[in-house]
Amino acid sequence: MHANGVASFLQASHGKLRGRPVFAFFLIRILVSCLLSPLACAKDSVVFIEKQKVWVLQSGEATYAFGVNERGELQHLYWGMRLSTQDLTSARSLPEWSSFDLSTTTTPQEYPGWGAGLYVEPALKATFANGNREVVLHYLDHNIENNDLEITLKDEISALLVHLHYRVHPDNGIIERSARIENRTSEAVTVESAQSAAWTLPDDHSYQLHYLTGRWAGEWQLQSESLQVGKRVIESRRGSTGNDANPWFEIDQSDETDESHGPVWFGELGWSGSWRFTIERTASGQCRVVGGYNPFDFGYRLAPGETLQTPPFYAGFTDRGRGEASRMLHRFQLERILPGSPHPRVRPVLYNSWEATEFNVDEAGQMALAEKASRLGVERFVVDDGWFGQRNNDHAGLGDWYVNPQKFPHGLKPLIDRVHQLGMDFGLWVEPEMVNPDSDLYRKHLDWAMNFPGRPRTEGRNQLVLNLARDDVKEYIFSWLDRLVTENDIALLKWDYNRNWSEQGWAEASLADQKKIWVRYVLNLYDIIDRLRSKHPRLEIEGCSGGGARVDLGMLRRVDQVWPSDNTDALDRLIIQYGFTEAYTPHVMMAWVTDVPNGINGRVTPLPFRFLVAMSGALGIGGNLNKWTDDEMAAASKMITFYKQIRATVQDGHLHRLRSPMESDFTAVQYLAQDSQQVVVFAYLHSQQFGQSMPLLHLQDLAEDAMYSVTSIDGKVEENTRKFSGAYLMHHGIQFRLRGDYDATAVRLDRVP
Ligand code: GLA
C-alpha cells in the first residue's frame, strides 16, 4: 500500500470506535489480491482460504493456521498435527473473561502490539513523536509467493506498519517467522520492543518446558520444568547469544511425551545478540512463546521511512517425541542454514595445538606437532592463540594482528607450506572483536572500545570489546582479516569471542540512536563474515566464544562448525554434548581428544573413552602429541581410521539419543545414515557396580527385514561376526560388553543385500 493509500485509509477510520472500522476494507483488499494473483491463493504449503479469511501453513506433518477476526486483528487458530484446509473456520475473537481481562487480551493474536487493554506479552511496543505509546495492529494486506507469505498489519490510527513474514520449509516441518517494522508516519517512532514472533500453543494444563543453560566449561545443561501460570523468561542481555541460556525451547505435554512419542512444539532464534523468550501461561490456560530482540535497554528510533527487521524465529511441531524434534532441527540446519547447505562439507579431522602449547607457539614447535598429527591421519592443523602481536599471555596483543616475528621469523608461510606437504590444510585462531588495552590498536584508537565516555571500562580476561556498530571499526576488522586470508593459505579461521559487553555506549552516534548498538553491532559482525566468505569461498570458520557462548542459527548460517565448550573432559562432555544435540546438529559439534588429568577437573579417563566421546561429533585432537606413547599413537590412528568410515553417518545422519547420561551410568547414541545404509552406535559406561552387565540396547527406526553386518571397533559386542536383522536390533536389542569405569565402544552396522 502506498503512503497516500495509508493516508486516505487513516481518514476513513479516524474517529470510529475501536475494533469496527477495518473489516470492509480488508475484505476488498483480500478480494483484489486474489483476483490479481489467483494462483497465490492455492499453494500447497501456504493456503489462503478466502471465504474464511484464514491462512493455512502446511509444514511437514504439522498445520499452522490463523485468520483475521471481526475486529481486523490477526488471530491465531491452530498449531499441531496436520489438518485439511476444510477443517478450519474463520477467526472470531474470544470473549472477555471479566472487565479485567478484556477480549483484546484473551484473543491470541499472531503479533500483538501493546495497546487497547493487552496484558499478555506484546510483540511490539513503540512510542510516537506526540507521546502516544500504544500500537493496535490490524490486517491490511497480504501476498503469497511459493512458500513465502507476507502479511502487512497497520496501526489502527497511525501509519506504523508491520510486515510479518512467514516462510514454510515444507520438507523440514519448520516455519520461519520475522517482522519488519516500517515507519510511514512523518515523524520519528521509537520501537521499545520488537519481537520476531508470538507462537501460540493449544490451551493445555500440563505443559513441560525444556531449555538450555550453562556457564563457561559447563554449557548445554538441559533444564526441564513444568510450565506454571506466569511468565518464564530466558534471555541474554550480554550483547551476544550467551552461555547462561541458549535461544532454543521445547514444550511438550508432560504426561504424553518422551524421547520417541508425543507432541512437542519447539523453536530457535537466528540472532547472535541479546535476545529474549517470554514463555507465558495465563491463568486461563493459554500458552505462548514470544521471542526476538531483548527489550531490555532497547530503543530503536525509526526516522520517517525507516524500517527495523527482526531476526528470524524458526519453529516446528512433531507428535513423535523429543528425539524427532531434535532430528527435525538438525535436518533443517543441514539443509537450510549451514554454509554449503543442503550439502555442507564434511568436517575434516583436525588437530588444535591450544591445550598442548597454550601461548607458547613457534614455528619449530608447531611443525613438530604437525608432523605427529599427520601420522595419525589428521586432515587439518590449527594454530590457536598466541601467534600474533605481543601475545605471550592473555594480557596483551589482541588487536595487533601481525605475525609475531620472534615466534615466526619468516611469517606463517613456512609452517603453512610444511602443513600442506604433510597432506593437511591449515587453520588459524583469531578474536577480531576484541582489544587488549595493552596493544598498539588500543593506544591508537582509545575510542574504538565500547565505553561510556568519562566512565571506567570493565575488563574481562584483560580485554575490551570493540564497538562493531561503528562502520570504521567494521571496515578495519574486515580489511585485516581479508589481508590475512589473502596473504596466507588459510582453510579455517577459528573465530573466538571471549567476553560479554559492558559499558554499552556508542557516543559517536546521535543521542537518539545510541541504543541501536544492540542491533547494529551484530549486523556489522554478520556483514564482516558474509563479505569475507563471499570473497574467499573456500574459507571455513569455526565459531567459538570461550567455548559455546555464541551458538545460534544466526551464527550457524555463517560458520561451518562450533566449539561447544572449553571443557574437554570426556565424562562432562557426555552431558554437554547430549544437551547440545537437543538443539544443534552433531555436524557442527567439535569435540577434541585431550590429555589427562583433564585441565578443567583433573579427571583421568582412558584414551579410548576420550576418543569415543569425541567421535560422536566432529572429531578433533587437542592433546600434546609430543607426550603420546607409541601405543597411544597407534590406538589413536586406529580410532581415526574408524571415524573416517562412520563420520558421514555421525555428522549428517539421524541422531537417536538412546540412553541419557543424566539418567544412568550407561549412555548410548545411535546415528542412522541419511540413506539408511549404515547405523553407528556408541555406548559408554561411566561406572559399573556389582558386576552388572549392560542392558540390551534397542536400536530405532531401522527397516524390520533389513540385514546388517556388524563391525566393532574393539569386539565389545555380542557375536561380533553375526549379521543382525533390523527387527532383532530394534525388538530383541544388542548386547554390549562394557565393564569397570569409563569403558566405551562403538559399532558400525552396514546394511547388506
Ligand atoms: C578460548 C577458546 C579456547 C582457546 C582460547 C585461546 O578460551 O575457547 O579454545 O582458543 O580462548 O585463548
Image: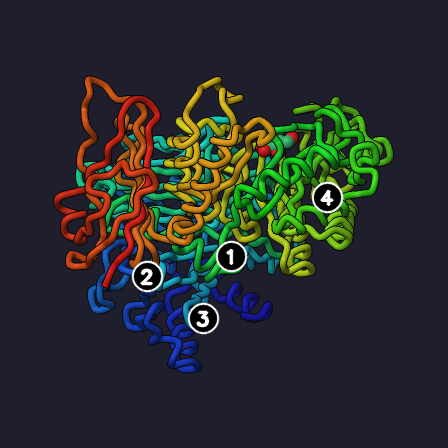
Give the Cα distance between marks 3 and 2.
Answer: 37 Å
In this orientation, which residue lies closer to the viewer: 168 or 531?
A: 531
Numbered circle sitting on residue 415: 4
In the rendered structure, the answer to whether residue 433 lies left or right of residue 548 reads: right
Query: Would you say the residues marked 4 and 2 are in contact, meaning their CB atoms lie under 8 Å apart?
Result: no
Which residue in the structure is indicated by mark 3? 143
Which residue is the site of mark 1?
Answer: 345
Do the CB atoms of the residues marked 2 and 1 lie less than 8 Å apart?
A: no
Q: Residue 485: image x %, image y %?
A: 72, 52
Distance, label 4 to label 1, CA atoms, is 25 Å
Q: Element at badge 4?
A: helix
Q: CA distance from mark 1 to mark 3?
A: 36 Å
Residue 418's tag is: none
Number of the front mark, 3 or 2: 2
Question: Of label 4 and label 1, which has the lower sequence position?
Answer: 1
Looking at the image, is mark 4 or mark 2 nearer the viewer? 4
Amino acid type at mark 4: Leu
Q: Earlier in the sequence, mark 3 or mark 2?
A: 3
